[in-house]
Amino acid sequence: MNVKTICAAMAVYAIAIGGADAADIVAEETIIAPAPAPAASWDGVFIGLHTGYGWTDSTVSRTATGPGPAFSFTQDMDGLLGGIQVGYNYQHNNLVFGAIADIALTGMSETGVFAGASTITFKTEYNYIATVRGRVGWLWNDVALLYAHGGLAITDLTTDFTSTGLGPVHGMTIGGMETGWVAGAGVETALSDRVTFFAAYSYMDFGGSQSQAMPSGRVYTVDNDPINAVKIGFNISLWQPQNW
């Protein structure tokens, strides 16, 4: 074997060794990407607080078959509302089904005055509004839920009458607890794995009018339009199935 052959063999061996070492360095420097974080889960029981604003119209009227004029007043009623809610979500892929119950105190009230032979003052107010609703939503992504909701609505709605005279209208109240239905839509977004923020619209209808006839032949009627309401609030997850 001549010198040239020996040199060529040594060069090939050196290249092979250098390539193996380089491969080891590349392998050692390879960074393994972390596993993706698990998608947020919407399953479980939650509780939260909300605030918002509601508006509607109320018409108070009097018809008379005896002495005394008739009247009719339409009042714009609006005000703030705020309360608490509790519910449960069940998630199946991108669908979320749920049930929610809430109750809110309201500032929705209005006072009217009729000046006739005697001055009659009447005040209509929603003392509270409660709902029991089902909802179904679609997860736009892991943290944003678009949903529709609907169900039962309950309110305490009263119109109190007082007068400067001594007639039976003094201290009369029309109304009380009323039931109806609610429907609407909303969006909810996850701020963390346990806290969400939501904004929702609701349309609530409590049915027809209420009337009361007086011995004088006068009939007092209160006709309340459906309520429109917008709410914002947050929910906190209290229990999730995977944690048990």
Image (cartoon, helix red, strand yellow):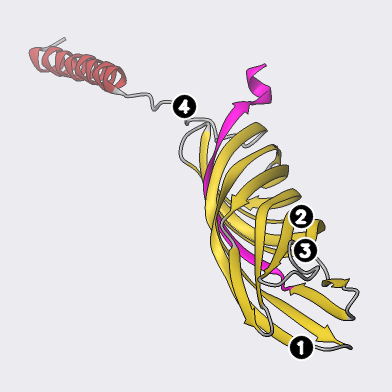
- The residue where tag 2 is placed is 153
Dot placed on the residue nearer the N-terminal end, 1 or 2: 1
Q: Kindly report the secondary structure that dominates the magenta region of the rendered protein.
A: strand
Q: Is residue 30 left or right of residue 60?
A: left
- What is the span of residues highlighted in magenta in the rendered image? 224-244
Q: Taking 98 as reference, is 231 left or right? A: left
Eyeballing the image, is 179 above or below 5? Answer: below
Q: Please name the amino acid that badge 2 sits on.
A: Ala
Q: Earlier in the sequence, mark 1 or mark 3?
A: 1
In the displayed image of the protein, which residue is found farthest to the front?
A: 166
Which of 57 and 125 lies nearest the eye of the viewer? 125
Q: Quadrant location of residue 73? A: bottom right
Q: Nearer the viewer, residue 169 or 130?
A: 169
Judged by depth in the image, the label closer to the viewer, 4 or 2, is 2
Q: How many marks?
A: 4
Q: Residue furthest left?
A: 3
Cα separation, mark 1 vs mark 3, equals 17 Å
Identify residue for label 1. Answer: 70
- Crowding at label 4, few (<14), some or many (≥20) Cα neighbours within 10 Å? few
Could you say which disc has been placed on residue 35 in the image? 4
Instruction: Identify which amino acid the numbered label 4 is placed on.
Output: Ala
Q: Are marks 3 and 2 in contact (CB under 8 Å)?
A: no
- Mark 4 or mark 3, earlier in chain: 4
> In the drawing, what numbered circle is on residue 172?
3
